Amino acid sequence: MGIVRKVLGVLLLAVIGLVGTAPAALAVTPVGIVVEDRAGVLDENTLLPAVQAIEFYQPTKVAVYTYNGSASANLNEEVLRFARAEHPEWISGDGQKWADGLFIFALDPVGRQVGTYMGEDRKVSLEQREDIQNASKELLRDAQWTEGTIAGIQRGAELINQPWYRSTAFLVAAWTAVAAAVAGAATWLIVRWRTRVSCRRELARGDASYSNVSMDLQVTELNAGTIPEASRYGSTVLEKHRTFMAKYNTATGLANQVHALTPRGLSRRPNLKLVRSYADAAAELDALDDVIADTNALLNRASAWAPAWDRQLAPYRADLAAIEQMLSKHHAEGDSATAAALRSFRDQSHRDIERWTAELADGAITPETALDRLRDARTHLSELLKNHADTVIDGFARNEKEAALMRRDMESAQAGRKAKYGRAYEPSILGTVYPAYYFFSVPTFNSGFTTGVHSVSSARGGGGSTTGYGGSGGSFSGSGSSSGF
């Protein structure tokens, strides 16, 4: 081991000597970010801060473009078409290349394709473009569109204008004699660094939720103490509350454990699972104490009943608002009878919401009746979505085998997609009283539909990659390529 250390030390000094003669690499956050989410799959509240924090070697403008295409479409051709029509500034003055200083990340969630495009002063090799795309694919295959986009842009920042002494070729040449040792050490360091970053992020998430719960602990107990137990909704929420303190004590124990971890401890993979358990436990409590407060305010018609009622309506309103975008997607059968039924129901529901709220304010209906109506409306929407799912499956599938694939994915989505860390939970009275799979929501429909189309396209042999810009590209020869995932 001593000899190995000496050899590594000599090589390290040699590398330092070589690097010391090279100009220092810049660390520059994007000079501009443009997001054209025409597919409607990105969470810009998550995407924009993450991309704004990514550091490039040279000042770079980042553009993100998503659209719903097909597995047989040429994503390169579509990106060029969109740029010519909507963003001519993305193209060089002579119209033959991408503009200098530009990096475009493109995504087709329906056709399951991802593409990367660069100005001449930012271009990388074909192999590096594939590297950038591959960095996003595992997340994209899991329909984590925002996270996959961030991962691809992060990898692009690592490779675009990369200094020679940070290139793979230089590292391989410099460390040939001890490749295995260095690779093992580098992997270990990278894993520990990523683990430490993830631990700190999860720790911050847990601390924010735990702090909220702790500060509101007495108020939560007071709210629970006045929830009418005779109410069907109140009694179920109270059942959840009866385990609240036990769960809080568990979260406290987890908090003590994770805060006792040293910086080195935060770099260990087993501890990441512990920190995530703490963050999930605290987040669940934070959501539940809000539901307890809203249940008390609404069922007792306290002074805060109106905003509490608005929070119960919020998931339903979000579904109604997303219907048109859902129906406008490729292969979504937007002109079908079941689509017309969804639109008609949406328009009627907006009127119903106004009427329920007015009757609730006047005392013409009880809060429990209002919640019953909301439950029935969401149940009806679930049935309409299931009917439309059948329409979409019939329209896209060519045979019963393909239909079965799509139906499986749609049913799996309704049964309960996993959130990034654990099962998604709706922090509302209905979301607390009924299981997660009770209501079929528009986001769940979209997830099942996208996954189903991918399953069928893969079965048909879809996928592949290309570097050309199709028949409409003309003489355009900008650096870029796309591939399937």
Image: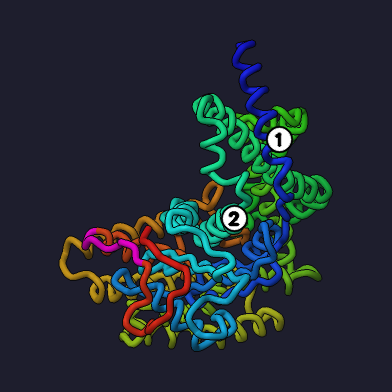
In this picture, which residue range is highlighted in magenta?
459-466
Foreground pick, 448 / 312: 448
When asked about the image quadrant of residue 293, the answer is: bottom right
Quarter of the rendering occupied by the N terminus? top right
User: What residue sits 65% from the left and 54% below the top?
Assistant: 229
Q: Position of residue 354 (x, y in %)?
A: 62, 85
- Viewer-nearest residue: 93 or 202: 93
On the image, the x and y values in percent for residue 182 come to: 56, 28
Q: Which residue carries the number 2 mark?
A: 154
Residue 12's spot in the image, x, y percent?
66, 29
Vertical placement of residue 353 versus 135, above or below = below
Decide if residue 384 is in sight here: no
**Disc number at residue 17?**
1
Q: Is residue 328 left or right of residue 3?
A: left
Residue that appears at 53% across and 68% down: 118
Residue 412: x %, y % from top left: 36, 55
